[in-house]
């Protein structure tokens, strides 16, 4: 609010209030306040209260802080008055008829100064009978006049009175942005039917064309007689794409117009849609939508880019589950466009969703694709995460000797709650485990319990083979090698990093106690595991960052080497131990079953 008051000091209102305080209501303030600061603060405060009442901002009266809302951003973007936004907020509904939508537009605050003159009533009454959408109000009402003028503008009707022409110009100048604001409000509220009607109204205003008229009227060069002939045929617009130039010429009885009409039909944007659906969890689906342009992209007609709206609607067509813009440029007009997004899914599973890709400027340019869920198999319901128990912090002396406890001096005298709860499963047993915890929870220390157990047994002669640490990124592997080399050095254990040279890596793997490698390098090393004893002898695998599975090349390679480790374990008499580390995940149980382990705290 204080920033708003400072901004008012740069306005003409402030200059006039300094000259004539009484006229502008600034005479009742302290005479010592020469800059009228309190007056400006009161103006900003009253404006903020009004905006807060209309749900355009969130106003904290104590601190004076202002936070814009979604409606406020729409109003600011399209320069819509707060009165209009309050009207839209009150009267806009999930399902609107054309009559209600035109009435709502006519109630906009921008037209509060439009009046009905006595000499206009006769012409307005004639207009009311000529426009296609019925007007409920009497022609004495200003809203009825605005409604009639908007419809007359779309219908390309001529007016006689000079005053009416001036008012129509005002309505025309405001119509485009107000209709866009209505569309944005419906879009942000997730109302599919209202958003579709508002977008259609935007395009009708911009094209001066009704939805029921021939789509070829969107081109300026089409003669009126030809458009009327095509409208009388009552042929569905989709069928026009299958007609040849001769067929179109036969429709209009003009042989010379066949090629021209065929070209115009194929210049109206048309898209082909293909979708692949993959469940992420029981409540979330990943959709890969492929959009293939199927029209003749001409920069003279379409400019150099066309904007489309990708909408995902529920099975009833009531709610918008996802929306994002898609832009098709002239340079890539003949190529596929892939859009990836995620949509929520309810339980029980609906039969299908509907994907729509609608042009932002062209009428009759909406592609629809029902996405069936008939054969979709959702993951099973996730078991609750392991509860983090309120345990007494475990001292580092629990490792069994002061020498081992000294290795974890950087952890303090006690382990943290996650490490305390995982300690028994990782250090006192050989069970497989998956630890899923947020960053900073000490996941790597948990893995070090298992590595330390393996190294101590190997150095004492009770174990064989190296412990192998695998991560998708080289920077992570280098950091872990440096950390473990310093931590295990007092025990005399060796840590080797795989370099990608197969012969050198096999020699290092056979002699070291701990090997660290990226997923790509371990993939090369473990492919011929039957001919490489050092690979088969590995007694412990630690797979880090499992939450990256399937993300890019590194994540895919990590999935491959982890799956190979499972297969190798099934072929050996003494299966290696597998420890998995990941960030907090929704499907920890599935990942644990895949690793053939049981989830630990996560």
Image (cartoon, rainbow, N blue to C red):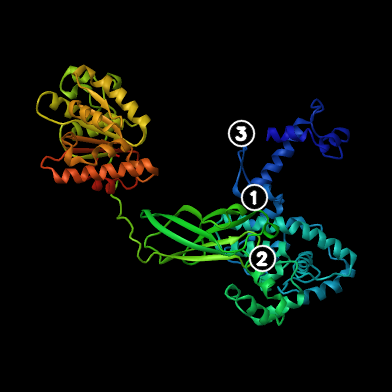
Using the image, determine if residue 172 lies above or below residue 82: below
In this rendering, position of residue 108 left or right of residue 534 = right
Number of dots carrying numbers: 3
In the rendered image, which quarter contains the C terminus? Answer: top left
Question: Dot 2 lies on which element?
Answer: helix
The residue that disc 1 covers is 74
Residue 62 in percent (x, y) is at 61, 35
Residue 524 in percent (x, y) is at 28, 38
Which of marks 2 and 3 precedes in the sequence? Answer: 3
The residue that disc 3 covers is 63
Residue 405 visible in the picture: yes
Foreground disc of the pair 3, 2: 2
* Residue positioned 71% across, 42% down in the render: 46
The residue that disc 2 covers is 101
Q: CA distance from mark 3 to mark 1?
A: 25 Å
* Residue positioned 24% across, 20% down in the render: 407
In the rendered image, which quarter contains the N terminus? Answer: top right
Which of marks 1 and 2 precedes in the sequence? Answer: 1
Which of 488/204 is in front? 488
In this rendering, position of residue 589 left or right of residue 40 = left
Using the image, determine if residue 476 lies above or below residue 103: above
Q: CA distance from mark 3 to mark 2?
A: 39 Å
Question: Dot 1 lies on which element?
Answer: helix
Quadrant in the picture for residue 487: top left
Dot 2, crowdedness within 10 Å: few (<14), some or many (≥20)?
A: many
């Amino acid at each position: 609010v204080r920033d708003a008051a400072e901004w008012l000091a740069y306005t003409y209102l402030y200059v006039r209030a300094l000259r004539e305080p009484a006229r502008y209501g600034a005479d009742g303030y302290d005479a010592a306040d020469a800059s009228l600061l309190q007056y400006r603060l009161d103006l900003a405060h009253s404006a903020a209260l009004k905006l807060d009442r209309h749900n355009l901002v969130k106003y904290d009266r104590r601190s004076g802080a202002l936070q814009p809302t979604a409606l406020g951003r729409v109003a600011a973007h399209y320069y819509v008055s707060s009165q209009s936004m309050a009207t839209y907020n009150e009267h806009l509904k999930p399902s609107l008829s054309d009559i209600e939508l035109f009435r709502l537009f006519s109630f906009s605050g921008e037209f509060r100064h439009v009046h009905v003159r006595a000499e206009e009533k006769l012409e307005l009454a004639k207009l009311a009978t000529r426009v296609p959408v019925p007007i409920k109000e009497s022609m004495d009402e200003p809203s009825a006049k605005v409604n009639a003028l908007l419809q007359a503008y779309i219908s390309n009707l001529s007016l006689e009175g000079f005053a009416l022409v001036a008012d129509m110009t005002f309505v025309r100048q405001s119509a485009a942005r107000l209709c866009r604001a209505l569309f944005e409000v419906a879009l942000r509220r997730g109302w599919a039917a209202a958003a579709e009607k508002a977008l259609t109204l935007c395009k009708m205003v911009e094209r001066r064309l009704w939805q029921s008229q021939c789509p070829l009227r969107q081109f300026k060069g089409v003669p009126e007689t030809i458009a009327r002939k095509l409208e009388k045929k009552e042929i569905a617009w989709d069928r026009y794409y299958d007609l040849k130039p001769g067929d179109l010429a036969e429709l209009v009885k003009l042989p010379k117009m066949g090629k021209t009409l065929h070209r115009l039909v194929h210049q109206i944007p048309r898209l082909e849609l293909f979708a692949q659906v993959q469940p992420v969890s029981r409540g979330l689906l990943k959709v890969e939508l492929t959009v293939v342009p199927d029209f003749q992209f001409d920069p003279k007609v379409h400019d150099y880019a066309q904007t489309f709206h990708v909408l995902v609607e529920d099975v009833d067509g009531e709610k918008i589950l996802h929306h994002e813009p898609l832009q098709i440029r002239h340079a890539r007009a003949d190529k596929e466009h892939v859009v990836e997004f995620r949509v929520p899914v309810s339980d029980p599973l609906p039969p299908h969703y509907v994907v729509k890709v609608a042009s932002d400027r062209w009428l009759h340019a909406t592609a629809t694709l029902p996405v069936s869920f008939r054969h979709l198999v959702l993951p099973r319901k996730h078991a609750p995460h392991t509860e983090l128990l309120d345990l007494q912090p475990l001292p580092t002396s629990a490792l069994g000797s002061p020498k081992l406890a000294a290795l974890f001096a950087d952890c303090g005298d006690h382990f943290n709650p996650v490490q305390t709860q995982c300690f028994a499963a990782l250090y006192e047993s050989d069970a497989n485990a998956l630890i899923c915890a947020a960053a900073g929870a000490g996941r790597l220390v948990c893995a070090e319990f298992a590595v330390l157990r393996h190294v101590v047994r190997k150095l004492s002669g009770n174990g064989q083979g190296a412990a192998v640490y695998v991560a998708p990124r080289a920077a992570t592997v280098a950091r872990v090698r440096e950390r473990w080399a310093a931590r295990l050095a007092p025990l005399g254990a060796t840590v080797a990093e795989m370099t990608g040279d197969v012969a050198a890596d096999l020699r290092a793997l056979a002699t070291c106690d701990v090997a660290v490698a990226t997923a790509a390098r371990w993939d090369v090393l473990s492919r011929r595991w039957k001919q490489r004893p050092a690979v088969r002898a590995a007694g412990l695998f630690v797979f880090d960052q499992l939450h990256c599975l399937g993300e890019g090349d590194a994540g895919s390679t990590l999935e491959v080497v982890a799956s190979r480790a499972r297969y190798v374990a099934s072929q050996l008499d003494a299966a290696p131990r597998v420890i998995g580390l990941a960030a907090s995940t929704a499907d920890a149980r599935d990942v644990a079953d895949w690793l053939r382990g049981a989830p630990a705290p996560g």
